[in-house]
Amino acid sequence: MLRLNRIHRLTLIALALASLATPAARAQPLAADAALDVPEAALADEAVAADLPEDAAAADAELDAASDADLDALLDVGTPAAGAEAATGVKWGGYAELGMAYTYRDPERWSHLRARGELTGSGQLAPRVRWKLNARAELDGAFDLEDEHYPAAVRRDQRRDFMLREAYVDVGHGDWEFRFGRQHVVWGEMVGFFFADVVSARDMRDFLQTELERMRIGQWAVRAEYFGTDTHFELLWVPKPSFDRIGKPGSDFYAYPWMPADTVVSEDRPGDDLDDGNWGARVSHLVGGWDLSAFYYHSYDVAPTLHAYAPGRAELRHERIDQVGGTFSKDLGSFVLKGEAVHTSGRGVNTFTLGGAVPAVGLVGLVGTDMVDYAFGVDLPSGDWRFNVQYYGRRLDDHRPGMMMDRHEQGVSLQVVHGAGTDLEAEVLAVTSLNRSDYSLRPKLSWKFAPAWRAAVGVDVFGGKDRGVFGVYDKEDRAWLELRRWF
């Protein structure tokens, strides 16, 4: 009886979020206290997931990579209430989605039964003054059905969520564009990983098993951008930083999977004072067909570092780091060559006294070391096929015994995408470490069976040594299904 009640509750949740797709819901304005979002000129810099529809249904093309004209077209979907747009000058778009994932390794369980809705509004306040607002809400019933597997802290963290993803105002003046508010700042564009993409925080509770755009957490920031003929210059100040969400001990993809589920974790998140803010600058220039960029970013690390561990307790902190990096890309006709590299100073790496793959209780050290992360890739289109091959790595300046990584970590990835007509697309993303042969394999099939609908089904598979980046999640293999409607 208890299980039936929970299933009934899940049904009600799904119906409630699905109602977002109705014309009446689309015509309603957002609450007056919702904040504003990201600037107009930088929209062209932000990459979009390639598997979304290219017609009006692609209002979810994440709205970040579109020009102003494209943004108008993308948001002009659905059938707003008569006269609503003329009266307000506001355009709405978004999607409703039902998703489920079943972990088929022991213990078998539902790891997602999620209803999600995302709503985006945009408008123009004056010539060259625009605003954008994007919010997402979700409910996940898996953590009610599987309460015997997930600890209470995990259920509280992942049962429901609301995120103001973007909320900004764009102001243009001459060759400059200024963006004020919560925004995504995308400085890198490698497949499947964040390398030069150092500014935005990320939702890591599902590891890297979803589109990077959906993982990004916006920063409250002020951004000034100059757009010249061949040069783009950018200044950034983040007075109130956002940080990665990594979940709780006992969750499927917790950052420290060896940590017992009953561990009480405290996380020191700076940012209460303006002195705690982040700042940086980036310049890109087109030289002989080569798109080159360089940046400097002074910040608190978006990813936490384990500073102390004892039986039942752990302390996480965000360290003050400096990052210098650059990117390049070049269209060579039949293929595109691209790469990224970032030098980081101020970050610490843990050392452990190992008992197998699990550190001995209480014996955790921290060594500060400079490091370089890099990636080189090739995009190769061929008819209905697209191939991407990447080689990536991390090199530590100071390496000590007991670190969970080698001095020089290396890996490769392969993405293969095949479109069968305009409605069906198959994709496989495979990633493996060259140091210990652990791997991640993610095949999926997407079907756009109507202009505003998409169904996707896939499998996430992990394997290899349990000290590897992917091998530690060897028992989290799962099959998943998503159904999405744009409006």
Image: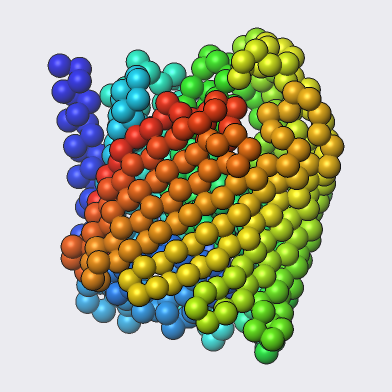
Q: Which residue is found at the position 53% from the left and 35% from the top?
A: 438
Q: Is residue 388 visible?
A: yes
Quadrant for the C terminus, please.
bottom left
- Between 163 and 306, which is closer to the camera in this rendering? 306
Q: Is residue 157 left or right of residue 286?
A: left
Q: Where is residue 385 shown, x and y percent of the image? A: 36, 68
- Between 391 and 40, which is closer to the camera in this rendering? 391
Determine whether 39 is above or below 249 in the image. Answer: below
Determine whether 241 is above or below 311 in the image. Answer: below
Quadrant location of residue 340?
bottom right
Determine whether 79 is above or below 241 in the image. Answer: below
Q: Where is residue 168 shown, x and y percent of the image? A: 56, 65
Q: Where is residue 310 shown, x and y percent of the image? A: 69, 13
Q: Which residue is found at the position 35% from the left and 25% from the top?
A: 105
Q: Is residue 336 left or right of residue 72?
A: right
Q: Which residue is found at the position 33% from the left and 63% from the top?
A: 418
Quadrant for the N terminus, please.
top left
Q: How is the image coloured?
A: rainbow
- Between 459 and 26, which is closer to the camera in this rendering? 459
Determine whether 143 is above or below 14 in the image. Answer: above
Quadrant location of residue 305?
top right
How many marks can you see?
0
Quadrant location of residue 63?
bottom left
Q: Where is residue 268 shown, x and y percent of the image? A: 70, 32
Q: Is residue 25 visible?
A: no
